[in-house]
Amino acid sequence: MTLSAPGESTAKKANRPVIAIIGGGVSGAATAFHLAQADGGPAPEIIVFEPRDGLGRGLAYDTAEPAHRINVPAARMSLLTDEPDHFLRWIDSHSATAGDADALRPDGNLFPRRSVFGNYINAMLQPFIADGAVRHRRAAVARLLRDGQRWCLVDEGGGETLADIVVIATSHPPPVAPGGLQTLLKGHPRFVPDPTKAGALDAIRSSDRVLVIGNGLTSADVIASLALKGHTGAITAISRRGLRSRGHAPFPQDPTGDFLTDPAFTARALLKNVRNAIREATATGLTWHGVIDQVRAQGQAVWQILPIAERRRIVRHLRPYWDVHRFRVAPQVEAALDQAIAEGRLEILAGSIAGTSVENEAIRCALRLRRHGETVERTYDAVVVTTGPGHGGILASQPFLAELAQSGYLELDPTGLGLACTRNSEAIGPAVGVTPSLLIAGPLARGTFGELMGLPQVTEHAAFVASVIAERLQATVLEPAENPR
């Protein structure tokens, strides 16, 4: 694909419809990118509200930690849906992994640091920003108000922008510490409630005994980061089921299985189908990886077939098992975990925290183990929370979301994974119903669309949202919004 030249400068265009995108991570940046290239209809003015200096980094890729790596090969990461190796070619043309000898694995796959992918997305947007087709407003949105047929976005500095269509592309809320830990450990110098923040692990000393609450990708990143910093203390990673994120297939495999020809209509039947497919794959010398890849590829169609009640069952009972197989750790991170386990520094437990007390900064925890029901007493110097997104707190995570919910424009989807929206990604609220001018892009739409966390699905959904907007602009001549004040 050859990128089309960005449109003529903003100064030369007048009376354009205004599209405001709240959030400039991958979802928001990709939506802006694809919308800026849309053919036909009035060329919109695209404004992306993102406090960070660049676009496309977001929560996942705005990290300077050298241990944080993309968790799929670079050859399968791309902003361009029809060129899956575009990122790989960008890396090569920009020597983006120079000085990172560990990025290239023995099997030839490239797993660069996550910041490289963020730099790639930002670089892809820069021509459109330089031309004026896309504007980057370096501010967070504080309020989003209906103003006649338009929306009024009030940023954190008090500035106002009128827009015809708004896209919510924000991320999930940070993890939530279980029980009363948030209150009990608040102010403790080595309590890390959100390890995604820059420098969050700096206070942890090399010999500290560390409790990591949660055992998914973020937990793996934390353990690998501590190892790279020279940490030698004991680490306990505890989660309800004690499931550790899995690594990549030992050899290349194509997606295998078919979950659509004879689809499952219940969570139990889907699980049975997946297990049968894994048994068949194993019998031919393959592993489970190709089967899970096929479930992911067909995931959105599979999700649409399932009734709401069965989707809820999957979220309640099967999602932890899906997550550890679907979201695989990079080989470098897997090696760090394996080494920590082999050296006896890392213990992975299935259980929960039954009680906690603090004495002179020592954190004493009673851990209730799931398998035997026994409770063990442990003492730690640091606690890191990696329990994953706080889905239940989405509407309360930002003031403008809470206000939209109170006014009836937004609500959680029935599965609790994100915001309710139509198959066109239009927001659904309890009082207002469907709002065609308010769209949801990215993982917050996963309750409706199903598989929407991996990079390919995120960029595909961003392209879809952009197409919905472009078609709407072609069909309707919108009354132009005023310039931001």
Image: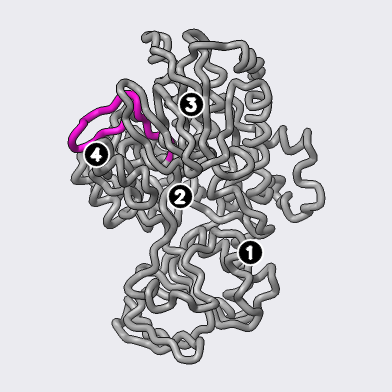
- Viewer-proximal residue among 294 and 382: 382
Gap between marks 3 and 2 measured at Cα: 23 Å
Q: Mark 4 points at which residue?
A: 407
Query: What's the residue type where badge 2 is placed?
Result: Arg
Which of the two discs, 1 and 2, labels the residue nearer the N terminus? 2
Nearer to us of marks 3 and 2 is: 3
Gap between marks 4 and 2 measured at Cα: 37 Å
| Residue sitting at x 53%, y 83% | 381
Nearer to us of marks 4 and 2 is: 4
The colour mode here is one colour
Gap between marks 4 and 3 measured at Cα: 29 Å
- Viewer-proximal residue among 480 and 413: 480
| Residue sitting at x 48%, y 44% | 156
Which of the two discs, 3 and 2, labels the residue nearer the N terminus? 2
Q: Which mark is residue 335?
A: 1
Q: Is mark 4 on a helix, strand or loop?
A: loop
- Viewer-proximal residue among 422 and 102: 422
Q: Name the residue under label 2.
A: 326
Residue numbers of the magenta segment: 427-442
Is 21 displayed left or right of 225 in the figure?
Answer: left
Image quarter of the N terminus: top right
Nearer to us of marks 4 and 3 is: 4
Classify 10 Å Cα crowding around label 3: few (below 14), some (14-19), many (20 and above): many
Q: Quadrant of residue 432?
A: top left
Q: Residue 288 carries which label?
A: none
